[in-house]
Amino acid sequence: MNYAMGIDIGGTKTALGLVSNDGQMLSKASLTTDLSIPPSDMVDKIAEAANRLLADQGLQQADLQGIGIGAPGPLNTKLGQIAEPPNLRSWWSFPVVQEFKRHFEVPIVLENDATAAALAEKWLGAAKAADHFVYITISTGIGAGIYSHGRLITGATGNAGDIGHMAIDASGPVCSCGQRGCFEYVASGTAIAREASYLLGRPVTSKEVFELALAGGDPAMEALVNRVFGYIGTGCVTMINTFDPELLVIGGGVSQIGAPLFDAVRNYVGRYALNPSGRSTRIVPAALQQDAGLIGAAALIHTQY
Ligand code: ADP
Ligand code: ZN
């Protein structure tokens, strides 16, 4: 048996977990990502928590095969750096791998969080048997991990799959990146809540929007949800046309609504994917919801990708 430490750095919290090479989560912890302190101080806190997890299991750093870090993009995995993630501003250009090396001598690997989650679905989740699949997360933002010919497609700097900024409605609203109608600016949980709050004149969550739309009797919310389903369908068709996957795995908070989303997306793909086999691409929910980030980060050490 050997062990990896998975670390999932997010804009609000950082989760870490000790994972064995058979995929068992032995223990885990969560810290608030404190953006008011220097990131190197945050690394000290994470390292301290990691050492505690090891000690609790009677293990030492030497028992670790390595440390896998999942972090939001844009990043630069070649340099081991965070680049410019909008929700991690104080970490821009931060050499995260080098900073963790102040505390650990084991190998340390950095990948985009959606890429790591895709690897988790391949290792233990919904994509175990697939050699060609795309994992899409629809949450605060939208991202993808692409697995093709039995390999993870990471790109030159680890930013492959940043489909949240694929323009999907060229006449849509201006995204934080400057383009119009980016996928995540029109179809993420954040986008749904923003648009519905504007339409209803009061703050609403994306969960509430789906409840209102599915209950019937609110044409504005029904129209919004149908538009969002259409955008998600468009994004999926583009992935299918580009990568010819045998499987699409959809995860993230918004995917929790389940059947209405999956039915709508299957229907859209069944009509608009270009090639006949693409129209019947299997589209399934992610199997690992809560711990996908952690398991994926550990999978960076435990699997060949
Ligand atoms: P994160 O983006 O931090 O990884 P999540 O994957 O939980 O977190 O995604 C959060 C987003 O998903 C929020 O916009 C939230 O409103 C939305 N969300 C969470 N649960 C649901 C649900 N059951 N139905 C619809 N939207 C949801
Ligand atoms: Zn954008």
Image (cartoon, helix red, strand yellow):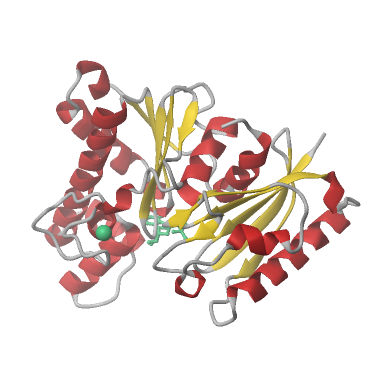
Q: Position of residue 91 (x, y in %)?
A: 51, 70
Residue drawn at x 43%, y 50% as measured from the top left: 252
Is residue 93 in view from this perspective?
yes
Where is 242 relative to 215, above or below?
above
Q: Position of residue 7 (x, y in %)?
A: 63, 55
Where is 172 relative to 269, above or below?
below
Q: Position of residue 201 (x, y in %)?
A: 19, 77
Residue drawn at x 28%, y 53% as measured from the top left: 165
Q: Residue furthest right?
A: 58
The quadrant in which the C terminus is found is top right
Location of residue 101 (image quadrant): bottom right
Is residue 73 in view from this perspective?
no
Residue closer to the observer: 284 or 294? 294
How many marks are shown on the rendered structure? 0
Left or right placement of residue 219 versus residue 145 in this view: left
Q: Position of residue 189 (x, y in %)?
A: 33, 59
Residue drawn at x 53%, y 37% as measured from the top left: 119
Q: Residue furthest front?
A: 79
The quadrant in which the N terminus is found is top right
Location of residue 242 (image quadrant): top left
Left or right placement of residue 76 versus residue 167 in this view: right
Residue closer to the observer: 104 or 48? 104
Where is 75 relative to 262, above or below?
below
Left or right placement of residue 26 versus residue 43 in this view: right
Residue closer to the observer: 29 or 214? 29
Ligand 2 positioned in quadrant: bottom left
Residue drawn at x 41%, y 48% as measured from the top left: 159
Q: Residue furthest left?
A: 171
Q: Residue furthest top?
A: 277
